[in-house]
Image (cartoon, grey):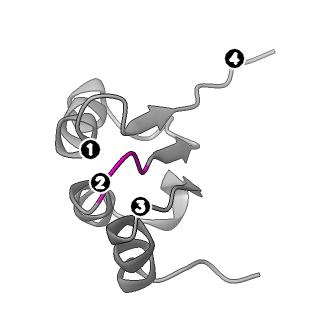
Amino acid sequence: MTKRTLADLIEIATYGGGFELSANDYSLDELVKAADALYSGAWMRVLHTDALTTKDLALIAQHGGPGGVQFVFTAAI
């Protein structure tokens, strides 16, 4: 399956839908814009966040509102 476009994510979020995506597939700017579109309890779960700094993650979270953005961190084995 191919990744969804930013326009797809914004449309889904605008209607209150949530989604899980990989940070490897989107730029920081695209992740912020998707978070901005979250509406009415919609959520966004971001996987593969290793390349993002704490400042980047905080910026994305800020744009998603309280509880709107979730990050998945994987432990190295």
- Label 3 to label 2: alpha-carbon separation: 12 Å
- The residue wearing badge 1 is 64
Query: Mark 1–mark 3 contact, CB under 8 Å?
Result: no
Marks 2 and 4, the one that precedes in the sequence: 2
Nearest-to-viewer mark from 3 and 4: 3
Nearest-to-viewer mark from 2 and 4: 2
Residue 29's label in the rendered image is none
Name the residue at 59% across, 25% down: 73
- The residue wearing badge 2 is 35
Which quadrant is home to the C terminus?
top right
- Label 2 to label 1: alpha-carbon separation: 4 Å
Q: Secondary structure at mark 2?
A: helix
- Label 4 to label 1: alpha-carbon separation: 25 Å
Q: Residue furthest front?
A: 40
Residue 14 percent coordinates (x, y): 32, 70
Q: Main secondary structure of the magenta part?
A: loop
Which quadrant is home to the N terminus?
bottom right
As drawn, 47 above or below 38: above
Q: Amino acid at mark 1?
A: Gly
Q: Residue furthest right?
A: 77
- Label 3 to label 4: alpha-carbon separation: 31 Å
Q: In front here: 11 or 60?
A: 11
Residue 28 percent coordinates (x, y): 29, 56
Q: In front here: 19 or 77?
A: 19
Query: Mark 2–mark 1 contact, CB under 8 Å?
Result: yes
Residue 75's label in the rendered image is 4
The segment highlighted magenta reads 38-42
- Is residue 40 in the magenta section? yes
Q: Amino acid at mark 4?
A: Ala
Name the residue at 51% across, 56% down: 18
